[in-house]
Image: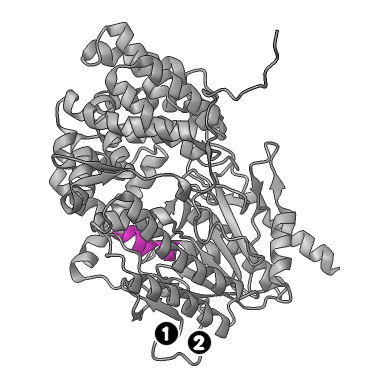
Amino acid sequence: MIASPALADHHEEAEKIVVKTQDDLPRFTYKLDRKPSELLAADDATFLAFADRVGADIDGVLAKYEIADHATLRSLLDAKGKIAMMHGDDATVMDTIEQERALEEKPDAKLLNGIREEAMLMAAQTAGATSGEAYEAAYATHLAAAVAPMPWDVVGTNLKGLKRSGLIAGPGLYKGSAISELDPVYEKSGALSSSAANELIYLRYAATRWLPVADETAAVLAKQIAERDVQKPDIWAAREVTLSASDDLTPVHVTIWDSGIDLDLFPGRIYTDANPSDLTDPHGIAFDLVENPAHGDLMPLTDEQAARYPGMLEDMKGLSDLQLSIESAAADAVAARISKLTPEAYEDYFETLSLFGSYSHGTHVAGIAARGNPAIRLSYARITFDWRTIPEKPTEELVRKGAANSKSYIDWMKRNGTRIANLSWGGSPSGWESALEKHGIGKDAEERKAIARKYFEIARDSLYEAMKGAPDILFITSAGNSDSSANFDESLPASFDLPNVLTVGAVDQAGDETNFTSYGATTRVHANGFQVPSYVPGGEIVPFSGTSMSSPNVTNLAAKLLALNPELTTTDLIDLIIEGANKTEDGRRVLINPKKSVELMEAKEG
């Protein structure tokens, strides 16, 4: 035999493109011949022709790109599975579910991912149909059988959330979402981006496959809850440190960089600037929606908005009860209202809810930060969050004004001796992409990506340099609520790796990871972010969930440490918080322990 040199196999798989951040992924543009709301209601053949274009691009991304981020992979697989379900391709649906479960890192999500879809497939096999009473009954039977053996302490909270989803499902919800959020995009450009297209695919799945079994889901899970629900133990009460006026305390200036504070709720605990300028207030600094200087501790409401606030506050409380499956009149009322929304009422209802959620946010955060600390002195760095479905039009001028304002906020804090700033908010390139798309800016999704990148970097670099230039201020920020890596998403400021920044993830009352919390290399500690009670403007106490609530719990601890020992540096504070925390066996959570941190501080002093 004559030897010959080894030759490369021409069929060898090409090396994949490594994806390090969300911005490394390609963007796609889908031209449509009708409004998204009309396509949502189209016949199967018409809708699936569109969905298959999206599916082909998903397959291409999975084949060509090496994506280490599990949340991104799960999102792509979920969209692929939804398309397969609408095609009746059961094998692909099950394959995507199994892949998603393998990528899940949270114990509850690993158990629950895809249980609805599995029950749908099994019901279709049992009933020989994908609709009708026999199918719905079979679905309920299969769902109950799947849920029954699962450990309640692991999955109970998520099942309550799934029950809530069943209660609020309604045709107006899905059509209204398409009309309010997707039709305006189409009207600007005649096309949808990848993210908007995926949203339309989910809406079609929800309207055709989820809605018919939503009532059965709520009924099955209500029975499970009634039979099995046990209140999780609260680990936080035993860890709490409460200071009193009789303690030897030093006032601590804490700035809540958020939507403002109802200062009337914190008498005797407000910081006052003795020499405010014409552009600032005695108790803080504020900018409006278009980044111009503003005044006042809270965003001003119109007369009409102020009149609606008490009623919407009841809806916010009802939504809070729904999250816990608490039987209450407010929960029943809000569930019925959402499920029966007409498409025409969708935008007004959810914009108003968003408005008052933003309006209340800073006060709620401040109440958590101030709890049990008479020495805290609160000030505000007030942002005006955009609550509208179509946000303010992004321009480079507006972005540069906002970037300059980041420095102005921090300059004010430095001049006024802020020791801790709480930042329960975030931003990422995808936020700019979405806003650009809604205003029809950019010839396609790839061009929007480039514009968004430019805007993001202007904002990011200014904020980063301003925070870096304030080493004596401890910035405590929330990880985010997207169940993804803040570092992969490039969330700012959660992804900042600075010695004076501490990023916080959310756990529940028992210290278990919430299903919404983001994570990543810069998320160093966790605190309670599940149904945390606090004030909203006017003085009502309402429980809210989010990393927005976990972050001020760490601010609360840091402020108490400084009240007891004002000589502590920013580095000292971070060390005490982390050293006093308890790392869980799975290594995913680092639970703050205020009592332990105070004990460590006292031991070091002694």
Q: Residue at x 35, y 64 (%)?
A: 385
Q: Assess whether residue 154 is covered by the magenta stretch.
A: no
Q: Assess whether residue 360 is covered by the magenta stretch.
A: yes
Q: Earlier in the sequence, mark 1 or mark 2?
A: 2
The outermost residue toward the right is 606
User: In the rendered view of the protein, which quadrant contains the C terminus?
Assistant: bottom right
Determine crowd level at label 2: few under 14, some 14-19, many 20+ residues with C-alpha closer than 10 A: some
Give the magenta part as a residue range: 355-364
Is the residue 524 above or below the residue 18 in the image? Answer: below
Residue topped by disc 1:
281
Is the residue 2 above or below the residue 215 in the image? Answer: above
At label 2, which amino acid type do we have? Asp
The secondary element bearing badge 1 is classed as loop
Q: Is residue 429 left or right of residue 243?
A: left
Residue topped by disc 2:
273
The secondary element bearing badge 2 is classed as loop
- Identify which residue, 567 or 370, lies in the foreground: 567
Q: Residue at x 64, y 67 (%)?
A: 500
- Identify which residue, 602 or 211, lies in the foreground: 211
Q: CA distance from mark 1 to mark 2?
A: 8 Å
Q: Residue at x 44, y 77 (%)?
A: 404
Provide residue 604's location: percent of width, then percent of height: 83, 65
Provide residue 557's location: percent of width, then percent of height: 63, 62
Residue 378 visible within the image: yes
Contact? badges 1 and 2 (CB < 8 Å): yes
Provide residue 41's location: percent of width, then percent of height: 15, 32
Residue 160 visible within the image: no
User: In the rendered view of the protein, which quadrant contains the N terminus?
Assistant: top right
